[in-house]
Image (spheres, coloured by chain):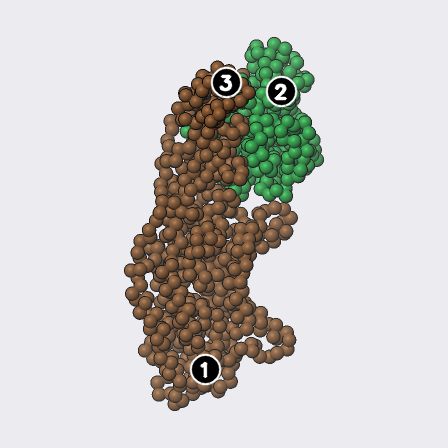
Amino acid sequence: MQRRDFIKLGFAVGAGFSLDTLSGLFPIASAEESAVPAKKDPLVAVRGDDRVAMLSAALMVLGSGGGMSAFVKPGQSVVIKPNCAWDKSPEFCANTHPSLVGHMVKLCKQAGASKVQVFDHACDDWQRTYRNSGIQAAVEAAGGEMISGADEGLYRDHPNPAARKLKQAKVHSAILDADVFINMPVLKNHGGARMTACMKNMMGIVWDRGFFHSHDLHQCIADSILLRKPDLNILDAFSPMLRNGPKGKDENDLIQTHALLVGKDIVAMDAAAAKLLGYEDGEVRHIDLAASMGLGEKDLSKVLIRRISPS
Amino acid sequence: MWRLSRLICATLVGLLVVWGFVNLHNAEPAAWEHLIERIQFIPALLGTQSGVAWAGVVLVSLIVVTLIFGRAYCSFLCPLGIAQDIVIRLHSFVERLRGRKAAHPARRYAPPVPYVRYGVLLAVTVGWLLAGAAVLAWADPYSIAGRFLAGVINPLAAELTNAVEGRQVTAAAWERYGWLLAPVVIMFLLPLILAWWRGRIYCNTLCPVGTLLGLLARRPLLRIGMDPNGCIRCAACVRACKAQCIDLQSYCVDTSRCINCYNCVSACKRGLRPHLVSPFQTPGVKKNSPPKTNCEKEPPSSSRRAFLGLLATSVPVVAAPVQADETAPAASPPGSVSVPRFLSHCTGCGLCITACPTRVLQPATLQHGFSGFLKPYLDFTQGFCNFDCTACSSVCPVGAILPLSRAEKKRTQIALASFHSERCIVYGHQTECGACTEHCPTKALSTIEGKVPCYTPENCITCGACVDICPQHALSLQPRGEHVQIDRAKCIACGKCSRVCPTKAMTSKRLMVPVLDSKLCIGCGACSYACPVRPERAMQITPLSRHGSAEVLHEAPAQNPVSTDEFPF
């Protein structure tokens, strides 16, 4: 880390703490409490101009100053599941931004990860998608491994007894075998699910997506979290696609939010993401369903939120 | 030197053709990668017919080369010829292993079989003129080899790569050709078996391209001519000849059957080599050479005359425009302009099929009808046409799929989607889906929040209020009046029925319902591919016989719904 980055980061962390006390939304949370690891993990909301710096800053806050070493122990294997579903170039923001994925691989490697695998069960041809999204190049440059998600043989049957609809699914072996699972989607509008963020991204760890669509999409999305709960969620909300989602049809569909959300509670993450797209409470049904199943907190007034802006 | 140049060229061509047909990474093909498939005779001929400029240049060049050297194409460029040469070499090797000195049992002069040769050529030409390229698909040696490479070698290369890398690099697509591998392999093996038995007999008897080039090669400028005065009749040349076209009795090389392998040139210790000969001189005979040769005795056969006459009168038939209906039984790739045009030009070499990243291009059995056997069609149950991809049009060596810019491709309407709400999950199950709009690359399919009716017959008093208000006449009271029937095909999810219902028998759910604007649809099939409804999908694709051009919807930049000064939470 360069000295300049370190100073920036210091400001970022400091800003996070101070904003938190100023916000007034969280009377319980105070700067003192935040200095020690909170009982409940916070949701870090970052606003900035550079995705990579925003991610580093957020992880410093969430990892209590230790960054990724709070999530990845040396020798552990990591799987990162970005949204890398569409054969679209990064300008369309239809996939997680490659700079973020690459940086995440680098951070995991620095924390001592034995291997970092990245994949998505792409909707378009996977090889073109990996290439044209820029994610493959970014991952490989950072020392990660981009693996296929395009063959049924790569998926294993996984029972999901606590689910309401998705009682059984074929889940990608990399997800089931890795020590740490990082969910790394991009925020977009979605024609069916209304919004795709952290929870909807879980569809890409499963082989048969058609089952979701034909058996109550929202319920299956909520159920899919039970297949394996992500250890960390990172949501790229820098330029969310407000309409015509999720494939990326027109750069005019993007809005400039310059935000990044990082947190462990997948439901809280999506509840916050929905607000960024202007959805009212209850409009995105899978958030409510997941909350009702006890998978996370959808009431953001009960979530410890740190708002920071590096740089 | 002559033979060596042939060996180097053929090896290079062989490798490049295999390279061209092996697609492991679904990369957008580079321009140079498929040059070798374009300098093939039939592709150049059909490309010229399609009005592709470079194809005309290639065709003229191939003709000029043939007029100068003879049938060099057959040994230097033709992939099926090169494959036969490998088999012949293998045969010689096996014979040598078994201790037989004679290189090949069939290495002796054989007389030509003009009736078969010109009969096949005539049949193929007539067939081509009457039925388009359907016949060429069976006869073109490049396409016969291409299909084998596409159907067998490409998946084999994928299996090998995966085994070597120890991970899934690419899927081996054996299922692409499926049972069609049987005709593909038989068509490829037939010449090879004949080659094992009698050298290049396929090329000299059955192959119409060989026969046609043979007509041009009757008087090549650079001819392998024997000097009866210097020859000691050792017959080394005859034993070396794969085409069985050297007649030592008359000191004559039948240039119409000679495939310019130059094996004889290497074998001859007495200076047999190609040399410049006046084109008006009869092959094999030197002026005033003492032993009279018999080469002149074969007159132009009547079938050959008939063929040449036919060729001369046939040009207007080929140029006649194709007639098209509105719809077609199967879709042809973007860039092919229309299905009939496509079928009359494609030889089914399979290059586009291997290049297609989504595997929507599949070899047809009878989807295109008889004339489309083994030619590609878009199988929307297997995949969909990638919006940003122009692979098929950039690799097509015959101009059946004309090159398209990416912008043109994104507007080319090859089919039209239709939405059948009676099958749609959103209408039927009253749950959200969105699989179709998710995949639609244009703005043809979108979802809007609709009010989808949910009917509970137990609560219904059959007052008929909902039936009266429905603007689509989608609701009807059953004959005996006990309940209301919803015709989901007509329902537009306006929610009026639930608003007037006095008893909560007709309620509605706010769900995202698909809306289709056909003007924007390019018929890529993504919606139908993604639609989870079975067996009949809610999104259906109707192929267009003549391709159209879709409109593009431009929208104003999206406005941020919430302030970005502070987080909205």
Contact between marks 3 and 1 (CB within 8 A): the answer is no
Q: Which residue is tagged 1?
A: B247
With respect to residue A285, does B127 lie above or below? below
Give the residue pinned by disc 2.
A292
Q: Which chain is green?
A: A
Query: Residue A42: x and y, percent?
Result: 62, 19
Do the residues under discs 2 and 3 have CB atoms within 8 angstroms? no
Q: Is residue B174 found left or right of B287 in the rendered image?
A: right
Is A186 placed above or below B292 here?
above
**Residue type, numbered disc 3:** Ile
Tell me the SS state at disc 3. Answer: loop
Q: Residue furthest front?
A: B480
Q: Position of residue A19 (x, y in %)?
A: 56, 14
Q: Residue at x 41, y 26 (%)?
A: B473
Q: Residue A39: tell me if it is visible.
A: yes
Residue drawn at x 48%, y 87% is B232
Same chain assignment for discs 3 and 1: yes
Judge whether residue A249 can be spotted in this image. no
> Residue at point 55% right, 22% down?
A285
Q: Chain of mark 1?
A: B
> Label for residue B461?
3
